[in-house]
Amino acid sequence: MPENKIWKKTIELNLEIPAEGSIYGDHVSEMEAVMRGVLDRIDRLRMDMRDNLGFDPVDHCLARIKSDRSMREKCRRKGLPETSDSALFEIRDAIGIRIVCAFLNDVYTFRNYLAEFDDYEIVEEKDYIKHAKANGYRSCHIILRVRGTYYVELQLRTISMDTWAALEHKIHYKKDFHNDKLIVSELKRCADELASTDISMQTLRDMITSIT
Ligand code: GTP
Ligand code: MG
């Protein structure tokens, strides 16, 4: 049977509710609905592009609602009270979606597509692709406000950017290497090489598309 909802495989709901109650109060089911709504729209473009291009432009897409424990930790770290107001309206990544595209241009195709909906408003954008972070991290981050209430953080990146971020995260997790100049500069070099490969792969795809 054809699978027509790609996002079914992508949601991570880590919603063990502690004895003292969820920091999200009674908003959880609405947050899930908002997340599914964004995923449905992503799926729609993804399937249209798959039909037109002959391949799926998205390598994978992940979605999660930040666990109660991480959200409480983040509130404490930011000096905010552990309330649903802080979790939903001060911190804006309670709902998070990551779209990992095969090719660079498609990152912006998805970004521009999501920006067009009347009930979505981009309230913040950090384009770490055009302006990479000093350590080499690349990704386009947008915060959408959905129907004037809930925020959704979207991270859009290519497979190469995702690979680098995953590896950097693993190394970082083990040890703080910020003062090790060689490691810092090697990581940056890897990020820059991957970025130049992304541009070459995009050029190859454009060449192939113009032939066929
Ligand atoms: P918060 O207040 O914690 O949301 O920080 P911010 O809004 O300044 O963070 P930003 O939007 O820059 O990044 C948020 C997320 O992007 C992180 O939780 C990571 O998932 C990812 N990210 C940002 N920088 C890096 C990086 O240098 N390495 C990796 N591996 N991931 C990063
Ligand atoms: Mg953030």
Image: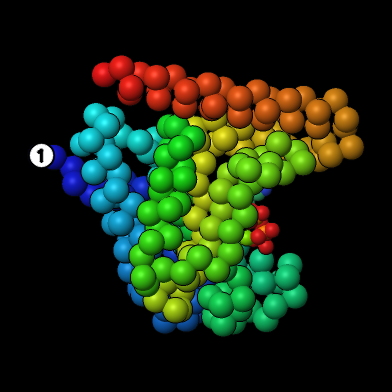
Image colouring: rainbow
Choose between 189 and 95: the one closer to the eye: 189
Tell me if 80 is positioned left or right of 101 in this view. right
**Dot 1, how many residues are within 10 Å of its Cα: few (below 14), some (14-19), or many (20+)?**
few
Q: Is residue 21 above or below residue 51?
A: below
Residue at image location 24% in from the left, 29% down from the top: 54
Choose between 3 and 47: the one closer to the eye: 47
Tell me if 179 is positioned left or right of 155 in this view. right
Residue at image location 85% in from the left, 25% down from the top: 182
Residue 151 screen position, x and y as percent: 49, 69
Disc 1 Cβ-to-ligand 1 distance below 8 Å: no
The furthest residue to the front: 210
Q: Is residue 67 visible?
A: no
Callout 1, which amino acid?
Met
Choose between 79 and 116: the one closer to the eye: 116
Q: Quadrant for residue 132, please give it.
A: top right
Residue bearing the label numbered 1: 1
Residue 24 screen position, x and y as percent: 49, 76
Q: Quadrant of the N terminus?
A: top left
The furthest residue to the left: 1
Choose between 113 and 83: the one closer to the eye: 113
For the residue labelled by badge 1, is the local secondary structure a helix, a strand or a loop?
A: loop
Q: Quadrant of the C terminus?
A: top left
Residue at image location 65% in from the left, 23% down from the top: 193
Q: Is residue 97 visible?
A: yes
| Total number of numbered discs in the rendering | 1
Residue 106 screen position, x and y as percent: 42, 39
Residue 142 screen position, x and y as percent: 54, 58
Residue at image location 29% in from the left, 48% down from the top: 45
